Amino acid sequence: MKKNLFTAAILSMALMFTACNDDEGTPDPGGETPGAAREFVSLTASIPDEAGTAGNGGTMAYAITHEQAIDPNFSVNIYQNGFGLRSARTARVQASEDGTELYNIQYTGEDGGVFNKYLVKGAKDYQDTGNELDLSDIVGTSPRWTKAAENIGIGVHLTGSTTVTEGAAPNHIFKYTRGKVRIAVIDLENAKVPNSTEFDFPFPAELEARGYAVGRIDVPVLNEAKTKIFIGCNVSKIDPSKLSYTTAGEPTWANDAANRTIGTTTLVVDYPSLQNPKLIYSTLSKTNNHSYRTMTQYVGTDGNVYQATATGGKDILRINKSNDDYDNGYHFNLDAALGLTDTRIQAWRYIKDGVGLVLYNIAGKGGYMALIDLNAKTAAKISSDYEAGLDFGQYQNLAVSGDFIYVPLTPTGEAGRLYVINWKTKEVIKGTTLTGQSGSSYLGSY
């Protein structure tokens, strides 16, 4: 039965450094490592559903120290010894900046849309705080949400998308396709919803009449001043002049994506009021920015928002902090930075001072990593032992702690390793061994 608990105990005790004793021989970390600003890094992995479909059966978690992460002789079997987060299917996991808390909104099933919060204590010890919140009435049972800023979650949902016509067969006239936007602000500390809203998606009537619509919104982020929320949009276009009918007699119109003229589109609303929705458009890219399961927008050290056109594009665009609109004078192109063609950003993480790590695919050729410099617009490929088997299709998150970024790499169904990259020195450590399991793969680090 779904729970709807809007009050929670205040959590004030910080996690203490402790030795972890488990069946994998976790050593005492022996103090904090220079450059490592946290006690634990959580790793997550997906498991298949009953039909064997990879990534659809839930999420496992396991927490390790930095010392364990960089030890190639240390091994994690997350599937046998990990902690199962609540969710009927693989859910999006978020975390506090210091990695001491994990947040999860269950995805589909009886408890789809229910928020849960866990304290990270090491290894498979994740303590359910009992902070539960039923958000299904606002953001549905298959929620799209992110930690948009520290202690602030934003859930979004586009619902009730409907095509309106005039006339009757065989002469239907297309008017528009439109859905309703739902947004919920989530207080991650106290498990409550301070504000929520609903409104029609605000495409101008002229664009709707030309066949433009949005079928999904996702990856919300707050700007540095916490005055605006930026939400990625999945824009589509049909040709209203090309009418046909399904075998059931329903009108349908030809896809017209090739003639799309508006650029990458972002929905902007005021925070915390959630009022004054507007759309901003890039002139540099037409690729959608609604992502899949990974966060694609980050506030940079300079206060600007950097937005990848993932998971189908090669662009990183910039939203200017001074006017909360696209900076159409700035464009990072991964193809150009690497001297390649057909790269697709699948996941990425802004680290600091314009430096980021990108996980990208090249169709039919595998998955790769690159450290990027957004200021110089350059990229340097980082080699791994698993490139041929990686696609990063369900990848979710990359943990950063001090000088290090943690990248678990496992082809689906196979073993792999945790790569620990010093983003300042560019040193790459092939660390913890990650045991594989059929239909399963690692999703990220927190």
Image (tube, grey):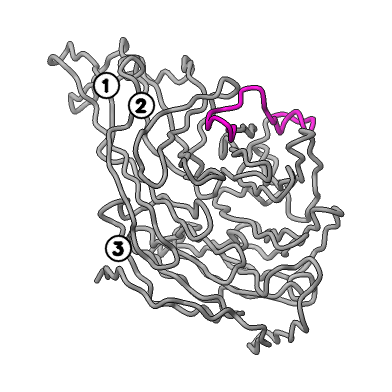
Of all residues shown, which one is farthest toward the left? 168
What x and y, as percent, mark residue 85? 46, 70
* Mark earlier in primary sequence (2, 1): 1
What x and y, as percent, mark residue 55? 49, 58
Cα–Cα gap, marks 2 and 1: 8 Å
Image quadrant where residue 117 sits: bottom left
Amino acid marked by disc 3: Asp
Residue at horizontal 18 percent and vertical 28 percent from the top: 248
Task: Reply yes or no: does residue 336 show up in magenta.
Answer: yes
* Mark earlier in primary sequence (3, 1): 3
Q: Main secondary structure of the magenta part?
A: loop
Label 2, on which residue? 213
Amino acid marked by disc 2: Ala
Residue at horizontal 62 percent and vertical 62 percent from the top: 445
Label 3, on which residue? 134
Cα–Cα gap, marks 2 and 3: 29 Å
